[in-house]
Image (spheres, rainbow, N blue to C red):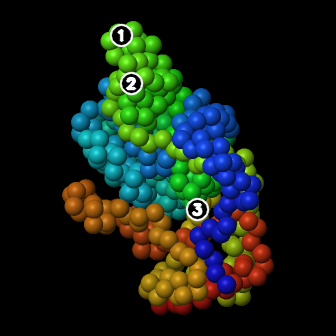
């Protein structure tokens, strides 16, 4: 038996939708992509959505937009962007790549998300934005973050790549700030294999994103008419009005992603049910000895779990490395909680981030934490028993 991070993510219908696109020979971004974007925006509660080839590309577009000359609140070189010490690499690198200065903030052990207390301590006159990285399906208190940012005129950016479908105060995570990003990578809440989405509520910002996504063209943007009139001597189909990338998705990705997105609530409920069953089994077992601490949920949060995080308690901690090797031998797949404290990564040393500053909670999560998958199919009793009995085999120091 085994327990992978995600098992058999695609249904037959998902794959058939992809095959239809292949048979149509219209593989590049087209009508299906646009339809997915419209449906996604409506369901999430955002005015605009733009599909890209990955969640990492969505983060790159988001940061590219806020330093762009067309953006009304344009950030300048070396402006500070707050980011939690527990983050994914491509939540961080666009900040660096676009000439902004990352300022790391510690996290809360109970929620794995950014610490409001440390956030307040890290704000300076140079703080212009905060990158909220919503970890494994939940968030910090976004009401409190909104209050702080409104008072200090700080832009909220939401990396929601791990938390599609989660709500805070009945608002979808990713729609609370200026921009929100999502990932459709294989093990996430929905998947198109690779793929992502970025949302916003401002028409000009949406069109900046659209131009940046496709080479810096004016094509299919609100800017086109103005530039077409001004540059009559140029080919209107190839008016380059901005910097840009090619971060477009394929129609195959969009077709599979849309098929999956229609089942998001169903998947979300199953993952939540599976998590509750695992916790219940562990706690009711006669072998339960408080081996693990589980993530706490703010009562304003409606989670959309990506993975099941466990923090090993003190009496069992010395055996963590042996225990994870044991789980690997049992074919129970595990992951660190994102990158752990990113300040401990070799790349952080290379770029000399926050030298000599302490992040005790992020260090604790790195030391104690790991996560396992939550599947989109109901866990059966045999798999539940296999998983939990092996989790309970961690030994005391």
Earlier sequence position, callout 3 versus callout 2? 3
Q: Quadrant of residue 156?
A: top left
Residue 6, x across and y down, in percent: 62, 67
| Residue at 74% in and 65% down | 377
**Front-lying residue, 144 or 352:** 352
Instruction: Answer with left or right where residue 19 lies relative to residue 238.
Output: right
* Residue 143 in sight in this render: no
Q: Which residue is mark 1?
A: 232
- Who's the residue at 38% across and 19% down the image? 235
Give the number of the mark in front: 3 or 2.
2
Look at the image and tell me in which quarter the N terminus lies.
bottom right
Residue under pointer 2:
238
Which residue does the numbered mark 3 point to in the structure image? 187
Q: Residue at x 48, y 36 (%)?
A: 179
Please rate how many residues cluster around mark 1, counting C-alpha atoms within 10 Å: few if below 14, some from 14 to 19, many from 20. Answer: few
- Between marks 3 and 2, how big is the CA–CA gap? 38 Å
Q: Is residue 16 above or below residue 212?
A: below
Q: Is residue 104 visible?
A: yes
CA gap between label 2 and label 1 equals: 12 Å
Which residue is nearer to you in this view: 253 or 179? 253
């Amino acid at each position: 038996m085994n327990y992978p991070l995600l098992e058999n993510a695609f249904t037959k219908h998902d794959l058939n939708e992809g095959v239809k696109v292949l048979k149509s020979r219209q593989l590049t971004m087209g009508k299906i992509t646009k339809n997915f974007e419209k449906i996604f925006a409506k369901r999430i509660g955002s005015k605009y959505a733009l599909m890209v080839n990955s969640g990492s590309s969505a983060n790159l577009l988001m940061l590219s937009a806020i330093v762009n000359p067309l953006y009304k609140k344009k950030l300048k070189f070396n402006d500070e962007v707050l980011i939690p010490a527990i983050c994914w690499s491509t939540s961080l690198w666009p900040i660096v790549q676009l000439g902004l200065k990352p300022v790391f903030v510690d996290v809360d052990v109970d929620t794995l998300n950014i610490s409001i207390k440390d956030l307040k301590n890290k704000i300076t006159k140079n703080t212009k934005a905060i990158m909220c990285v919503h970890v494994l399906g939940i968030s910090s208190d976004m009401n409190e973050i909104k209050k702080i940012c409104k008072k200090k005129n700080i832009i909220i950016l939401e990396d929601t790549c791990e938390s599609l479908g989660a709500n805070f105060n009945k608002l979808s995570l990713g729609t609370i700030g200026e921009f929100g990003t999502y990932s459709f990578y294989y093990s996430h809440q929905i998947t198109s294999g690779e793929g992502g989405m970025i949302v916003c509520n401002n028409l000009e910002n949406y069109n900046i994103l659209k131009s940046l996504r496709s080479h810096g063209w004016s094509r299919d943007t609100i800017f086109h008419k103005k530039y077409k009139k001004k540059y009559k001597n140029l080919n209107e189909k190839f008016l380059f009005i901005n910097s840009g990338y090619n971060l477009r998705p394929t129609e195959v990705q969009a077709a599979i992603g849309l098929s999956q997105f229609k089942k998001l609530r169903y998947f979300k409920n199953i993952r939540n049910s599976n998590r509750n069953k695992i916790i219940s089994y562990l706690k009711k077992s006669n072998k339960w000895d408080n081996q693990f601490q589980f993530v706490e949920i703010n009562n304003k949060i409606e989670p959309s779990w990506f993975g099941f995080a466990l923090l090993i308690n003190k009496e069992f901690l010395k055996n963590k490395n042996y225990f994870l090797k044991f789980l690997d031998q049992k074919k129970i797949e595990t992951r660190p909680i994102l990158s752990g404290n990113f300040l401990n990564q070799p790349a952080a040393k290379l770029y000399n981030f926050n030298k000599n500053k302490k992040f005790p909670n992020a260090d604790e999560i790195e030391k104690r934490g790991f996560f396992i998958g939550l599947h989109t199919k109901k866990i059966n009793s045999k798999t539940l028993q296999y998983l939990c009995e092996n989790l309970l085999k961690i030994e005391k120091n």
